[in-house]
Amino acid sequence: MAAPGFERIAVSEQEPLVRAKNFDEVCLGYTEDEAVLEAERCLNCKNPRCVQGCPVNIDIPGFIMAVKSRDLRGAYDKLSESTALPAVCGRVCPQETQCEALCIRGVKGDAVAIGKLERYVADNAREQGMKPSVSAAPNGHKVAVIGSGPAGLTCAGDLAKLGYDVTIFEALHEAGGVLTYGIPEFRLPKEKVVAPEIENVKSLGVKIETNVVIGKSVTIDELMEDEGFEAVFIGSGAGLPMFMKIPGENAKGVFSANEYLTRNNLMKAFREDSDTPIFRPAKVAVVGGGNVAMDAARTALRLGAEVTIIYRRSEAEIPARAEEVHHAKEEGIIFEMLTNPVEIIENEEHFVKAVRCIRMELGEPDQSGRRRPVPVEGSEFEIETDAVIMALGTSPNPLIASTTPGLDTNKWKCIVADETDGKTTKDGVFAGGDAVTGAATVILAMGAGKAAAKGIDEYIKGK
C-alpha cells in the first residue's frame, strides 16, 4: 500500500453520538501500520521549519524517520531528548498553529500529522515499558520546583537529566497541575496517560511532595535558607478564575470553569459513585470561546445537559483549537456567536433561570489584533438555562508573590521573569508558564520550563 502524498492518514475516533455520552477518549490513535504510512509522507527537509515552530525544539524529522523505519525505541529516545510529556503533547498541543503550520507538506496538501505520530510513539513506549534515560551522575546541587504542571515537570525533568537533586512541591493532593485538574478525561486520560508521564519524570530521580502550599506550608525564603535549595523554579500556573462582574453572577448555579472542571477531573464528579457529586442541570450556558470553554461545554454535555456556548466574537476569531470546535459541534453543542451576556436572571430561590444577552458586531481591531466586539443597540434576548459556566480565563494566585520579598509582579499579578532563562527579580528564583504569562497552552509552559532549567543550570554553575 503506497503512502499518500497530499492527504494525511485519517485517525479513528469514537462516533459523535456515542462519545457524547461517555468520558472515554475521543481520538483512538494510529495503528503501527497507519503511523508508518503517515511517517512516509515526511520529506525529511534539510531545513526543517517544523522544528522552528515547536516551543521545546523536538527533532521532528528525526523521530518521524525512526517511525518510518519502525524503530520505535529510537523514535521515543528522540522525543525524550526534548520533551518529558510526549503522550500529553501529542494529544493537547495546538500543532496546527505551531509545528504543522510550518510543514512543507501543508503548502499543497495536508501537513504531516506530527502530533498524532508523537502520540503514537509515546503510547507505544508506555505499552512496552520504555523509560527515558538518565544522562548525568548526581552533581550534589538541590533545586526546588513549585507546581507539578507542565512547566514544573519539564523543568524538573531537564534538571534531573543534568544531575540535579530536584523536589517538586505540589499544592493539591495529586500531581499533574492543569493536566490533572483542568483537561477532561475524553481529551487526556489521567490513569492511562498523565500518571505514567509523571512516573517517567520521577524515574529520573525527581521527588514530588503533595499537599504543600508554598506561602503557607513553607515560604520560598525558607526553602532556600533552611532547607538548602540553591535555586527555586515557580511553575504554579494560573488558577484564579475571572468573572464578568454582571448582575446575577452570584446566583446558585454559576460556576467558574476552573471549579467545574476541577471537580469533574480531579475529584471525579462525573462518576456515579463519586464522593463529591456535582450539580447536573438540564441546560447549561458556557461563556467563552477558548479550549477551556470547549472542555467545560463538552463535559456538561456528557453529564446530560443541553449546552450552549456564548461567545462575543465570530467563529473566525474563536481562540479554541479548530479540532475542539469541530468535535463540540459534532456532539451537538449549540454555538451562539457574536453574543455577550449582560445579566444572569434568577428565580425566586436565587437559582439561575436564564441569561440575558445582547448581539454584537465586530468593530475596529483591539490591541490583540482581533476586531473589537461592539453591542448592537436594541438586540437583547434571553437564553433559558439552569446553570452558567464562566470560561473567561484565569490569573495567577497572588499567594506566592505576596509571601516572597523581592519578587516583582506586573499589573496582571503575573510574576516578572525573563522569557529566555526564567530569571525573576529575586536572586536564585526563576519562573515560567502561566504564572508568568497568564493562562496559555501546555506546550508554551513546557517551553518556559525548559528555558528555566537551562537558566538554573547556568546560575548554579556561575556561583
Image (spheres, grey):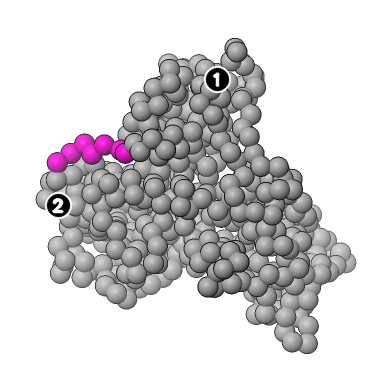
- Residue drawn where x is 46% and y is 47% of the image: 193
Q: Main secondary structure of the magenta part?
A: loop
Residue 61, labelled with which disc?
A: none
Residue 448 visible to an observer of this rendering:
no
Residue 348 visible to an observer of this rendering:
yes
Amino acid type at mark 2 = His
- Residue drawn where x is 40% and y is 39% of the image: 126
Q: Report the front residue among 299 and 436.
A: 299
**Residue that label 1 marks:** 37
Q: Is residue 140 left or right of residue 74?
A: left
Q: Are marks 1 and 2 in contact (CB under 8 Å)?
A: no
Asked which quadrant contains residue 70, the reply is top left
Amino acid type at mark 1 = Leu
Check if residue 245 falls in the magenta segment: no
Q: Is residue 31 left or right of residue 254?
A: left
How far apart marks 1 and 2 lie (CA) works out to 46 Å
**Residue that label 2 marks:** 141
Q: Is residue 126 left or right of residue 39?
A: left
Q: Is residue 148 above or below residue 197?
A: below
Q: Which residues are magenta?
A: 131-137
Q: Is residue 163 left or right of residue 435?
A: left
